[in-house]
Image (spheres, rainbow, N blue to C red):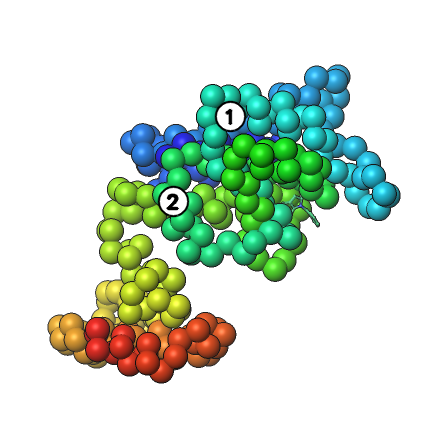
């Protein structure tokens, strides 16, 4: 997979040199290219923003600069374009799974009050353009949202996660635990500051362990995300019980 990221703060993406994503880049699984938007601004101040038409606070990112950058970065191809924004479609595990199938993604990181809307309209003519939100809170720009998306997508790519089961068993991945939150996890020592590991986990009885984990996931989901359970009806829960 090729990932292009355009931003006025390319240094935000140095975390993509470490851990799983960094290894995938060095292995060639991921081809990540970071671009400084100001390289396409040719005035002496490298201006990328201007005042909003219609008035209002803040500044808006100029369409010409974005147009020059996107034209050059996408020369000869048509990636899927993602623009992060507070007013976008919610980013979900399902969207991460879908995006992980794409051969080429272009992430555009806005700043200020956002990117002139004509940019998304212009490129929507020749490529798929998605405006995506990573949650109902307001960031100062798109970079952190892109980091979140790249990590969620990157870990789904073949060979990126050491233990392939890690992604398959995700809370939001299809299967018996879908739409349930992760339950508690434990490792050695068996007793830590007088606190023991739940006995069932030491039993070696895989069926009992699976059921215990499902029950704990249900308990945590009921406590922290009852909304996820509305999507699960009794029939589905019974069916999953039989799968355990
Ligand atoms: N989930 C999510 C995404 C963002 C986000 C993404 C890109 C940008 C570019 C500029 N801003 C600042 C901004 C503040 C208010 C209104 C509009 C834009 C951004 C915020 N915030 N929260």
The residue at the point 48 percent across, 37 percent down is 80
Picture disc at residue 100: 2
The x and y percentages for residue 52 are 81, 39
Q: Is residue 191 shown above or below 95?
A: below
Q: Position of residue 171 (x, y in %)?
A: 36, 64
Of all residues, the one furthest to the left in this rendering is 204
| Residue 31 lies in quadrant | top left
Q: Earlier in the sequence, mark 1 or mark 2?
A: 1
Q: Is residue 173 left or right of residue 5?
A: left
Whether residue 59 sits left or right of residue 224 in the image: it is right
Mark drawn on residue 186: none
The answer to whether 182 is drawn above or below residue 127 in the figure is below
Q: Which residue is drawn at 64% across and 53% down?
A: 87
The residue nearer to you, when weighing 192 against 105, is: 105
Percent x, y of residue 233:
39, 79
- Relative depth, front residue between 217 and 95: 95
Q: Which x, y percent locates residue 59?
A: 77, 39
- Residue at figure coordinates x 29%, y 69% from the top left: 176
For marks 1 and 2, give the CA distance: 19 Å
Judge whether residue 40 can be spotted in this image: yes
Could you tell me if residue 216 is visible in this image? no
Using a 10 Å C-alpha cutoff, classify the residue at mark 1 as few (fewer than 14 neighbours), some (14 to 19) or many (20 or more).
some
Tell me the residue at 27%/77% (across/down): 239
Q: Mark 1 points at which residue?
A: 74
- Residue 244 sits in quarter: bottom left
Quarter of the image with the N terminus in it: top left
Please tell me whether residue 175 is drawn above or below residue 59 in the rendered image.
below
Nearest to the observer: residue 18 or residue 77: 77
Element at label 1? loop
Is the residue marked by circle 2 packed among few (<14), some (14-19), or many (20+) residues within 10 Å? many
Mark 2: which secondary structure? loop
Out of 64 and 138, give the one closest to the viewer.
64
């Amino acid at each position: 997979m090729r990932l292009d990221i355009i931003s006025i703060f390319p240094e935000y993406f140095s975390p993509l040199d470490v851990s799983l994503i960094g290894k995938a880049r060095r292995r060639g699984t991921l081809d990540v290219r970071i671009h400084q938007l100001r390289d396409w601004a040719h005035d002496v101040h490298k201006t990328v923003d201007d005042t909003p038409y219609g008035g209002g606070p803040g500044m808006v990112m100029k369409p010409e600069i974005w147009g020059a950058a996107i034209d050059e970065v996408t020369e000869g191809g048509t990636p899927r374009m993602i623009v992060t924004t507070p007013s976008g479609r919610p980013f979900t595990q399902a969207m991460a799974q879908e995006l992980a199938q794409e051969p080429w993604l272009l992430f555009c990181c806005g700043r200020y009050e956002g990117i002139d809307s004509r940019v998304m309209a212009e490129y929507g003519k020749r490529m798929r353009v998605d405006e995506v939100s990573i949650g109902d809170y307001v960031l100062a720009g798109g970079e952190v949202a892109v980091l979140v998306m790249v990590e969620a997508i990157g870990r789904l790519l073949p060979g990126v996660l050491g233990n392939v089961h890690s992604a398959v068993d995700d809370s939001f991945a299809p299967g018996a635990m879908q739409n349930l939150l992760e339950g508690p996890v434990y490792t050695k020592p068996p007793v830590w500051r007088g606190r023991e590991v739940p006995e069932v986990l030491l039993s070696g009885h895989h069926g009992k362990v699976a059921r215990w984990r499902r029950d704990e996931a249900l308990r945590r989901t009921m406590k922290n995300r009852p909304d996820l359970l509305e999507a699960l009806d009794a029939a589905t829960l019974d069916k999953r019980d039989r799968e355990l």
